[in-house]
Amino acid sequence: MRTVVVKRVDKGEPDTAEIRGLVRAAGHEVVAEVTQVRSADPAFELGAGKGAELARTVRDMDAEFVVFDNRLGPYQTYNLGQRLPAGVAVIDRFKLILDIFGQRANTRKAQLQVELAELRYELPRAEAKASLAKRDEHPGFMGLGEYDESRKRDIKARISRIQEELSTIEDREAKRRARQRDSGFDLVALAGYTNAGKSTLLRQLASELSVDQNEGLHPDLDPTAASSDRLFETLGTTTRRMLIDNRRVLLTDTVGFIADLPPWLIDSFNSTLEAVYRADLVLLVVDASEPTEVVREKLITSHDTLSARNQAPIVTVFNKVDLVDDAAIAEIEQAVAALTENPVCISAAEGIGIDHLEARIADALPDWHAERLVVPQHTETMPLISWLHDNARVSEVTYGGGSVLIEFEARPSVIDQARDKAASLYQTPGISG
């Protein structure tokens, strides 16, 4: 689709880099851009002269789409459509994002979240159309024919049904996370803006052995993690195993953040973000090759997004340091010193700083506790010892006097399970305490 990009700002210089990237991610071709610095026009978003320039540009470039980096109301969308050549579609950045999400939604959960976001986007427009139709001011508003009040009710009912199904999925995934922790796994989530390099870092840190769907894990877990320059390459969650200081970790990559997302859109993807909110540790990945002020603004937005519900410590990771010099890194670190403490500098693509990052992950993971168990020396004891080697850090196993002393470190939940298993040994026929 031949597309003209439009952006209006109140002041400063309009930056169209991100919206151009979004347009390309949607499969469109950017053929021109129109920008303006002024306050928003309530009827057209742009001023009259700039609106006329947009119409000329669309005709000259034979464009089929116009994408605004600004949020458009239903009336502005309609008014702009009347000014442009027939057949040219006008959408804003949020509708474009939803279109991209729709293209990438390959799981039931992702599809539900996209549909929920689309319905929340449409609801205020449905209410506006219903209001106008009720007053008979604009029958056939936007060329859609008589608008029935029932459409608004249908949208609200569908939103309710989707929320119920997503709630069921969230409950199931919460139980899965509990089982993983009980089995000795630490849960680490990658967060950050799209294209910051999260998927590349996932491949660098984790084992090539992907999480097996036959192990009782959620079937939405994608066995591969793609690395590319496409925005929103990762829409759902991708989880892989990793080993940090002899601790078993599940590392999850999630959908990337993007600037200026409205709360309703973030809320629609709450189910996917639960992997971040409920992790034991969050790695907040930042593209250090971007301008300092951009990095600072993205860190502020990321912390705002995470702070409301996140329960885990956050380690900030400055990625792509191979693309900038030490002076630029020092400038960024000074600019964000109040936002993040002791960030880790890496290049996921080149493998720079990965050892340092792994050490920080080990330090930041929840503490393990030391434990000593004395169990009877018997063939039935060997499965317990094997299980502890899989789920804990065993420092010593001592045999003598008909008993076995096992010294290890583990999560509290694993220690509780080990105690129960040890107690059950004494109740096994043929074994005495």
Image: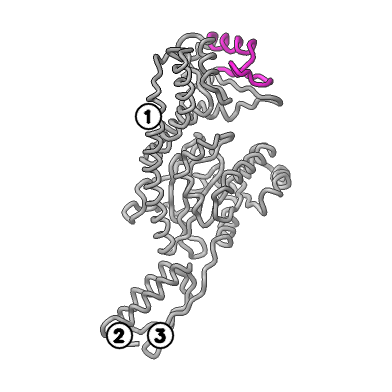
Residue nearest the viewer, comparing 325 with 393: 393
Residue 34 falls inside the magenta stretch: yes
| Disc 1 element | helix
Q: Earlier in the sequence, mark 1 or mark 2?
A: 1
The image position of residue 40, as x and y in percent, is 64, 21
Q: Which residue is mark 3?
A: 399
- Give neighbour class at mark 3: few <14, some 14-19, many 20+ (Cα, 10 Å): few
- Give neighbour class at mark 2: few <14, some 14-19, many 20+ (Cα, 10 Å): few
Q: Which residue is mark 1?
A: 154
- Tell me the distance, in whole angstroms, between the alpha carbons under discs 3 and 2: 16 Å
Magenta range: 32-60
| Disc 3 element | strand
The image position of residue 272, as x and y in percent, is 45, 44
Q: Earlier in the sequence, mark 3 or mark 2?
A: 3
Q: Earlier in the sequence, mark 1 or mark 3?
A: 1
Q: How is the image coloured?
A: one colour
Among the 4 quarters of the image, the one containing residue 384: bottom left
The amino acid type of the residue labelled 1 equals: Asp
Image quarter hosting the C terminus: bottom left
